[in-house]
Amino acid sequence: MQFTAAQIAVLINGKLEGDASITVSSFGKIEEAKQGQLCFLANPKYEEFLYTTQASIIIVNDTLELKHKISATLIRVPDAYSAFAGLLSKYQEMITQQLSGIQQPSFIASTAELGKDVLVAAFTYIGEHVIIGNNVKLFPGVFLGNNVQIGDNCILHPGVKIYHDCVLQKNITVHAGTIIGSDGFGFAPQADGSFIKIPQIGNVLIEDNVEIGANATIDRATIGATIIKSGAKLDNLIQVAHNVEVGNNTVIAAQAGISGSTKLGNNVMIGGQAGIVGHIAVADGSKINAQSGVTKSIKTPNTTVTGSPAFDYTAALRSQAASRNLPELEKRVKELEKMVQQLLMEKQNVE
């Protein structure tokens, strides 16, 4: 597909500088882009490439001041990075909207309801009483168990498995290999040392505008629902246990794990490989650094924690600074010990 600079400027509400009729058909990095490609400049570290790139169109910040003349057409916006991200999203939407129809082989139960412009790719399984909204894209190997509900404009990439009774609302993207609605880890210990499985009869509810990475697992609730609230973004390889609640616009990086019945507030940020124990609450706006182990509730909003067990980030920095001085402190303690010994010997000699 080809787009003119004028068309792109309208899409991202930008101001044009240069040839409005010039066209592009692909994207490129500013340091490598060629004629017919579009790129962006947001990081000042890459500004030198602005004057050497062969790109036809460049998205830049309003505040950029040119040091030399350039041949490319500029589109100025308040935030070049966000504008470029939005443009990529619109481009991807245009591509996926062209995909629709039912490929074979696939299985669709007679009681299932499909909306308009749905793609059911080959080897998809759609169970009894499933409800699928408009413009949903199910890529190869997707499994939808009985009574699953999928809202408008959802995209399920290859191999996604949605167990029975789970609900995905609108504008949700789930990447390849993710499993939603598998049993929560519930077993009752017995007197003889064995375990009895506790049936997991709840479901998973995922609200609007959520994105979930590849090979993540979100367990169904024992009773009630495991809830991922609107706007949340989950990276690859994340474990969300039964009855967890993930707040609005919370972001979780790869390999993090949240144990059962923990409640994450809104706008929480969790770094990679962090672990959070069960049955605690994390206040709105909290930041949990990578590889932290959170063992108790974070009650104060906008708190940053680090370490395992996790504690206040500022205090952690002071502790790290003190630990770096330990060799010098040890040396001083030994010198003081020698001085004390000498004073004691002198006192004994006097006596």
Image (cartoon, rainbow, N blue to C red):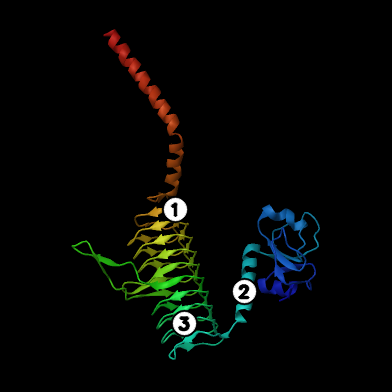
- Residue 211 placed where, x, y %? 51, 70
Residue closest to the far front: 105
- Local crowd at mark 3 within 10 Å, few (<14), some, or many (≥20)? many
Question: Which one is nearer the viewer's eye here, 299 or 108?
Answer: 108
Q: Which residue is mark 3?
A: 125
Q: Which mark, residue 118?
A: none
**Residue shown at 72% from the left, 67% from the top:** 38
Q: Are marks 1 and 3 in contact (CB under 8 Å)?
A: no
- Local crowd at mark 2 within 10 Å, few (<14), some, or many (≥20)? few
**Residue shown at 40% from the left, 22% from the top:** 335
* Mark 2 or mark 3: whose residue is earlier in sequence: 2
Q: Say if residue 60 shows up in the picture.
A: no
Q: Which mark, residue 291?
A: 1
- Residue 87 placed where, x, y %? 64, 70
Q: Amino acid at mark 1?
A: Gln
- Looking at the rendering, in which quadrant would you find the N terminus? bottom right
- Residue 69 placed where, x, y %? 81, 58
Report how many numbered discs are placed on residues in the image: 3
Q: Amino acid at mark 3?
A: Tyr
Q: In which image quadrant can residue 71 be found?
A: bottom right
**Residue shown at 45% from the left, 75% from the top:** 161
Q: Amino acid at mark 2?
A: Gln
Instruction: Give the mark toward the camera: 1 or 3.
Output: 3
Q: Is residue 299 left or right of residue 193?
A: right
Q: Secondary structure at mark 3?
A: strand
Q: Say if residue 19 shows up in the picture.
A: yes
- Residue 53 placed where, x, y %? 76, 59
Q: Which residue is mark 2?
A: 92
- Local crowd at mark 1 within 10 Å, few (<14), some, or many (≥20)? some
Question: Which one is nearer the viewer's eye here, 242 or 171?
Answer: 242
Q: In which image quadrant can residue 54 be found?
A: bottom right
